[in-house]
Image: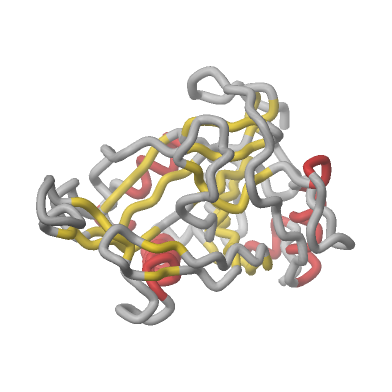
Amino acid sequence: MKPREKLKGVVRSAGRPASALGAAGVGVAGASLLAALGTSESNAHPTETDFHLGRYTYSSSDCTDVGVDPITIIFTGDELTSQFIRMHANRFDHGWWWFHVGSPQYFWDHFDCEPFDDQSATGGGGEDRFHVRYNLADSGGVAEYVPPYGYHAPASPHDEEIVWPGCGFFGPPKHAVRANDEVPGGGFVSARQKLLDDWTNAPDGEHFEVGALWWDNREWHEQCDGGLVRSDGYVYILDTMSASGGSGNPKGRGFSF
């Protein structure tokens, strides 16, 4: 399959993010995907030339800050686009992640710092909610197709609550990711599980959790309300299949978990 043009804005060039991508894989298919994504299994702390995707989202347009939300899911699929993710997330039978407005963040992708493609949430800006940003991986503005996984998009789901006043005595309400001592695993892990459940339990039967990669993106993040949250270091692969994908079995697409 030939790469398609990526449906998004101009890719911005930038410097190296503060943290390089961790690289140990889980399972044969996980190792294959790491290799396909340009990571190195033999080096736990690869140099810039050893990886294509960053471990976090970033608040700065050059991806030089410490990172905001960890990547905990990679969507894959033959028909995958950011519009595909948005359309499915927006459905009642996929959890109804219906709200698509929020603050901008950036993804480190193939040695460029790119504005995120899109976002979906289960509530509006003034509500407790699950929220995810995602970005279709590309090289030079062209979406990258990696057989047998197809196109792929890193995502950063998080479980966030509204804080009032806005993390201080004054100001509008703000969101803070739920701390690790507030929900099991913290807001990054709980939101990952929520998104995986919403897609894999959907009645279309086309989406499969096919394994996890070890990225070691476990840095603590202090929220504006003082809560501390971090992920568990694992990134789960969510194969979206395709309407014409055939078997309904991820092993039929070359996965070997």
- Where is residue 97 shown, x and y percent of the image? 28, 51
Q: Nearer the viewer, residue 170 or 173?
A: 170
Task: Return the residue found at the far right.
Answer: 42
Q: In the rendered view of the protein, which quadrant contains the C terminus?
A: bottom right
- Where is residue 59 shown, x and y percent of the image? 45, 40
**Color theme of the render:** secondary structure
Image vertical order of residue 41 relative to residue 84, above or below: below
Q: Residue at x 44, y 70 (%)?
A: 189
Q: Nearer the viewer, residue 39 or 83?
A: 39
Q: Nearer the viewer, residue 154 or 145?
A: 154
Task: Return the residue found at the far front.
Answer: 169
Image vertical order of residue 249 relative to residue 136, above or below: below
Snapshot quadrant of residue 79: top right
Q: Residue at x 72, y 32 (%)?
A: 1
Q: Residue at x 52, y 57 (%)?
A: 70
- Where is residue 111 shown, x and y percent of the image? 70, 33
Asked if one can make out residue 115 in the rendered structure from this viewpoint, the answer is: yes
Q: Residue at x 49, y 20 (%)?
A: 9
With 138 as the anchor, is 34 left or right in this view? right
Asked if one can make out residue 203 in the rendered structure from this viewpoint, the answer is: no
Q: Count all numbered tags in the image, as a single digit.
A: 0
- Where is residue 37 shown, x and y percent of the image? 74, 47
Snapshot quadrant of residue 187: bottom left
